[in-house]
Image (cartoon, rainbow, N blue to C red):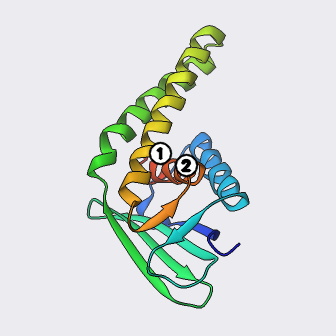
Amino acid sequence: MTKRLSKVTLDESSIKKRSKEAEHEKQVAIADLLGDNLFDPHCMGEGPYDLVLSIADGRLNFDITAQSGETAKAVLSITPLRGIIRDYFMICESYYEALLASNPSKLEAIDMGRRGVHNEGSEALKELLNGRINVDFQTSRRLFTLICVLHIK
């Protein structure tokens, strides 16, 4: 299939030092993304594609390279995602606190909320990419995880 990602890289210069949990989330998201994805940049030749994600000047950059060597860049405002990312970080912090406290009932409730916020971020990202890059929900979900990793302070 040519409408897919074959390599995903995060620009390490735009990332601060991460916790073990965040590094694990990044690795899982990339592995899952490469295992199954739909990624179809408009106005670009055949894939598969390599993607470098970065954040610069408050903008999210998708640097895309096709198998043919053709390159393209999609630059998106991160503003529509900021509130969702902030909420996602807050709920993840609560999740890890409940995990450490071994509170299964609280953990389950927080996890449901975490998935809901993650889904909301995925839909918002999919909407931002609309007209530039066609992605399915699962691809958007994994990309949202990676965008959150880029925002870790």
Closest to the observer, 129 or 78: 129
Establish if 28 lies above or below 62: above
Closer to the observer: label 1 or label 2? 2
Measured as percent of width and height from the top left, residue 122 is found at 47, 45
Answer with left or right where residue 132 lies relative to residue 26. left
Q: Residue at x 65, y 46 (%)?
A: 24
Badge 1 or badge 2: first in the primary sequence: 1
Q: Disc 2 residue type?
A: Phe
List the residue tagged with mark 1. 122
* Label of residue 153 in the image: none
Measured as percent of width and height from the top left, residue 115 is found at 54, 31
List the residue tagged with mark 2. 137
Q: Disc 1 residue type?
A: Ser
SS type, badge 2: helix
Establish if 19 lies above or below 9: above
Q: Residues within 10 Å of mark 1 (few under 14, many from 20)?
A: many
Establish if 12 lies above or below 69: above
Mark 1 vs 2: CB contact within 8 A: yes
Residue 87 visible in the picture = yes
Establish if 153 lies above or below 106: below
SS type, badge 1: helix
